[in-house]
Each structure stands twice: as C-alpha cells, then as structure tokens.
Amino acid sequence: MTEAPNESSTERSDAGGHLNFIEQLVEEDIAAGKNGGQVFTRFPPEPNGYLHIGHAKSICLNFGLADKYGGQTNLRFDDTNPVTEDTEYVDSIKNDVRWLGFEWENEFYASDYFEQIYGFAEKLIQKGLAYVDDSTSEEIAAQKGTPTEPGQPSPYRNRSVDENLDLFRRMRAGEYADGAKVLRAKVDMASPNMQLRDPIIYRIKHAHHHRTGDTWCIYPMYDFAHGQSDAIEHITHSLCTLEFEVHRPLYEWFIERLGIFPSRQIEFARLNLTYTVMSKRKLKQLVEEGHVNGWDDPRMPTIAGIRRRGYTPASLREFADRIGIARRENLIDLGLMEFCIREELNKTTHSVMAVLDEQPIKLVITNYEEGREELLNIENNPEEETITYRRVPFSREVYIERDDFMENPPKKFFRLFPGGMVRLKGAYIIKCDDLVRNDAGEITELHCSYIPESRSGSDTSGINVKGTIHWVSVPHAVEAEVRLYDRLFSVENPAADDPDGQLRSFKDLLNPNSLEIVRAFVEPALVEAARSGEQTNFQFMRKGYFVLDPDSTTNRPVFNRTVTLKDGWAKEQNRKS
C-alpha cells in the first residue's frame, strides 16, 4: 500500500473551493464581464521536438481551465521556424495531447495567419512604428546596450514609411539573402526592459516550410506571431511560463498599437523536475548523439518516453494537480511523480511472478510426483473491489531468485536456507533438504520437500512460516527481457550543475547506470499479454511495477520497469511533517 504524501506548497484549486492565482484572475475577468465572460485558452507548441512532462503540465492547465469555466481550447502549432520543424513532431504532439485525455476545439497553425501577420507588420510600418534594418546581428546586439546602459538607435531607424514599405515588400519577394535585412518594431531603445529595445519582428529565411512550402521567405519572430495569433483566435487568457514575463509589455504594446483583440497574458512557473532536464535543445542532443534510444526512450522526460515507461494519463494528470500552479520557480521531486503512478498501479495492476535472474536457482521438490502438474488459483490483486484469480501452472521443478537463498544466513533472514522452510507464493510450504553444486562450487539446485496439506487457500498443516517467496514453474517458464530503468542523470539538479548551458558538463552528468538489461523467467500468462500487442501494466511480485514494451514478440516479451515498489518519497514527506 502507498501512503498519501503531504500537499504541495504551491497554489492549487481543489474540491474545497480554493483557487489558484490564475483561476482568481479568470474569475475577476468573468465578474467584470470581460470578453462576455468567455474563457478561451490555447496550447501553442512549436513542432520542433517531442513534448515533455513540462508540456503535460501546461496541457492540463490550459484544457482544465477552459473546461472548468465552460470555454474551449485550441491546439495551435507555432510553426514560424521552418528550419527546425517537421510533421513528425506535429503528429507526435497531437498523439500526446489525446493520450493525456484532452481534445481541442480547433487545430490551428501560426502559418494559417502568415498573410494576416504580414498585414499587421505593414500596418506598423505605415504608422511609423516599424522599420527595415540592414544591420548585422552583431551590430543589432551592440545597439541594444546592456541592462544598465541604454541602447543606441540604428542608423536605419529613421527611414521613411515609403522606403520601409518598399524594402519590406522586396524582402517578401525574395530579393535579399538570409540575414541581409530584418524588420524591427520601433519601441524604445532606452527602455529598462531589453525586450522593448526595437525588437526584431521579421527575418529572412529561405527555407522550405512543412506546410506552406516555398511560398514565404520571410517569417515572423515568436513575439510578433504569438500575440497576433492569440488575437486572431480571440484567446481570452494566454497562459505561458515565467520566462515570458518580460515579454508581456511587448505583447501588450502590439495589441495597443494594432488595435487587435486584447488577449491577457498570464505567466506561471514552469515545471522543473529532479534528475532530468527540460530543454528541448538538450533532449534533442541526447537523441541525436545516441545517449538514449530515441525520443520515446523510457528514461526521457518526454510524454512519449514516460508513456513507454508505463505511466498512465491519469497518473500524469494527478501529478499535475498535486504540484499545482505556482508564481515562482521551484524544483519538483521526481519521487512525487513516482508516487502518483505507484498509487494508481497498486490498485489496478495484476500481481504476477517473474524471476529476474540471469542464473536462477532450480528448486526440485523431491517428494512431488514426477510428471505431475497442477493449476493453482492465485489472487490477482487484493486491492480490487472484486477479487479475481488467475490459473498458474505448478510442477516438481521451479525457478527462484538466487537472492532468495543463503547458505549461511544472518538472523532475521526469512527466505530459504539449508533446513529452513518458506511458502512458495500461492502454492505450498517447502523445506530445503540438500544442495547441488557445479564444478565451480556454485549452487545450481536445491532439493526440497513439500508439505501436501499446506496448499494456499486450504492449508491444514498447522505449520506457520515467516517467509513467502515467488517462483516460476520450470517447464512453463517463458524467457523474457527486462529493462531496469533508473534516473537519467546522476545529480538531482543537472540544470544547476550546468548554469551556463555548456553541453560538455551537461553530458558528463548522465547516469551511467540508468539502464540495466536482465534476463528473466515469467509466468506463461505474460505471453498472452505480448500476443495482444497492448501496453499492459503488471506488478512483478516483490520487484516493482512493469509494463510490456512495444519491442516484445510473441515468443520473447520485453518489460520496462515503471517504478519500484519502495516509496521513498512518501516516507520522506511524512518524516518532514
């Protein structure tokens, strides 16, 4: 059984009616009659990689907020950078959102609005609020000054409206090379907010776009495309992470100057999780350099990887709810996410027997008739409302794990040892009578005797034993591959250990023991799961929670460890309380 942890200190809404700060702002808008009391949100990923657990938090927030207030959520792809974007990522994002249990009202792309956004840019030029700049990127960076020193105006800042319109239209026509010119908004080069120092809003990029092809060779920058897309869709509450807080004055400047729908930007703390990183750039490097086996590697914090590891949509939604919505950055313990899936799987999975040992010990029951087999009724999960059973074959020879036997045991070792007695789970009480060794002196077999009257469920032997161990019948055992996954990084906060984003140190922090592959012998029932081809979760008795991997074949199933049975996080929270 898992223990419930203490509540997060972050702000959250719950059944008691407490509102997080975003819900408070939304209800203030509704009470004021703003936007007719409507709540329209959007989830706007850039299709340049796979979504990760931080995006899952944003998905739950945007869709959950709209659902709570009877609104709607759009899925909008911010596809303004053709060099890094691909339809593979578009498809994966849609799959992840649906897997989490959400369905969007409309599917839009920033590229749907390229003509409108271009029109907004011309409007700014006509109002004397944007200009074409021939400066290099290095010169523009120098012009912007520093946070403590004002910027210097570009020598091209005072071009006439007509000249700017002509140059911008020629940029669109493809007359200039990449980097030759940019369009900048004319805001305030002395502003203490660096984002307002004449930001670039269009750049030249001769690249094939995954949707518009070669129609465009100029593309809007994020700050210009994002708010305008919100306005076009009449998004009432534009939720984004804290790094965009300094961008909000520019977001509002564009709304005011263009006279467009006044979407409200609200920032919240992004999800930072221990023992992993959330940078798409770094995750992409892990994939491309072969440090992991693809975007869906179960060690990755991507939704695809977490799904393959055996997490469920409900567990991720519960995790998002427990961490709440905060105004400031914090680091969330990975143990909380593990608690959420462990709590769910404890109630829903079938407990099965698997011997995870390259060289298990064969246990021969000498007084069990040769050739005899029987099917035992073994309980699937005592947590189920209606207890169900499965039929497990039992025979004269069974495998047990090597760790379940010691020749010279210490005190309080309640497993098997010479002369000792244990119960085989769901079967009989046995006694170890003799050992068999190979030429190297290693124990290969245990000769045991069983007590016929001690069968589980009908035990009349009157004998009590302290230990129960799991087993698999040798003639019925199915060989399987088991992948034992651990933390991806060896330090709790790899981002803090790489403050400057230096990828060399980032890779040095990878956990060399994040994956161990072992041979196992499992119940034959698990072959049926492999044949079904469905992602099925199990509790491997005394070992942890596992899930069937897509690499499985009908003859050789493959299982990924989702999480161990031990719940260190809940115990630590209770200790602190």
Image (spheres, rainbow, N blue to C red):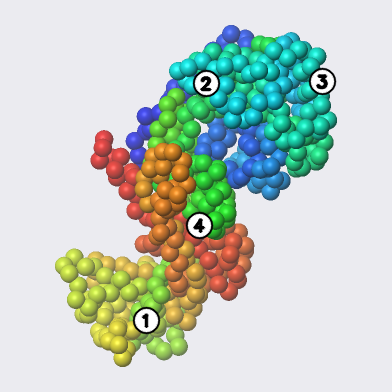
Which residue was labeled with disc 3? 166
The residue positioned farthest toward the left in the image shown: 411
Q: Nearer the viewer, residue 123 or 502?
A: 502
The residue positioned farthest toward the top in the image shown: 32
Local crowd size for mark 3, using a 10 Å CA cut-off: few (<14), some (14–19), many (≥20) = few
Where 339 falls versus 431 (above or below)?
Answer: above
Q: Earlier in the sequence, mark 1 or mark 2?
A: 2
Q: In x, y percent, where is residue 114?
A: 77, 29
Q: In x, y percent, where is residue 142?
A: 55, 25
Q: Is residue 402 left or right of residue 89?
A: left
Q: Earlier in the sequence, mark 4 or mark 1?
A: 4
Q: For the residues marked 4 and 2, what is the alpha-carbon distance in whole angstroms?
A: 39 Å
Q: For the residues marked 1 and 2, what is the alpha-carbon distance in whole angstroms?
A: 75 Å
Mark sitting on residue 362? 1
Q: Earlier in the sequence, mark 2 or mark 3?
A: 2
Mark sitting on residue 455? none
Give the residue type at disc 2.
Gly
Residue drawn 52% across and 52% down? 286
Which residue was labeled with disc 2? 145
Q: In x, y percent, where is residue 256?
A: 66, 11
Q: In x, y percent, where is residue 323?
A: 43, 34
Where 451 falls versus 513 (above or below)?
Answer: below
| Front label number (1 vs 2) | 2
Total marks in image: 4
Mark sitting on residue 291? 4
Q: Nearer the viewer, residue 360 or 423?
A: 360
| Front label number (1 vs 3) | 3
